[in-house]
Amino acid sequence: MGSTESTLWIGIGFIGQALFSTRFFLQWLASERAKRSIVPLAFWYFSLAGGLVLLSYAIHKRDPVFIVGQATGVFVYLRNLYLIRTGRRRAEA
């Protein structure tokens, strides 16, 4: 693997980590505004985006521990988004 490709993948890894970390900042801001602990919808979207980017990085690195951890997280984030969507549909009906 060339140094340009290595640099690209390091950049991808940092982008994924930034997306993933942003979710905590968003959750903190939403909770401060509400004066109670809440999890905004954006938390799950940033979790999914960061998880997918980090999963691609883990696959590239061929790190089975990192792959299993991120793949499991992606499933949880997708499930939560599904539950939110179906819950809203039921509430509208």
Image (tube, rainbow, N blue to C red):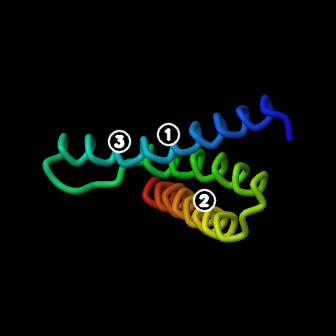
| N-terminal label among 3 and 1 | 1
Q: Position of residue 87 (x, y in %)?
A: 48, 61
Query: Residue type at mark 1?
Result: Ala
Numbered badge on residue 18: 1
Element at label 3? helix
Residue at the limit of the structure toward the front, as seen here? 3
Numbered badge on residue 26: 3
| N-terminal label among 2 and 1 | 1
Q: CA distance from mark 2 to mark 3?
A: 18 Å
Query: Residue type at mark 2?
Result: Leu
Query: In front here: 62 or 29?
Result: 62
Q: Position of residue 55 (x, y in %)?
A: 68, 55
Which residue is under mark 2?
A: 78
| N-terminal label among 2 and 3 | 3
Q: CA distance from mark 2 to mark 1?
A: 19 Å
Query: In front here: 67 or 34?
Result: 67
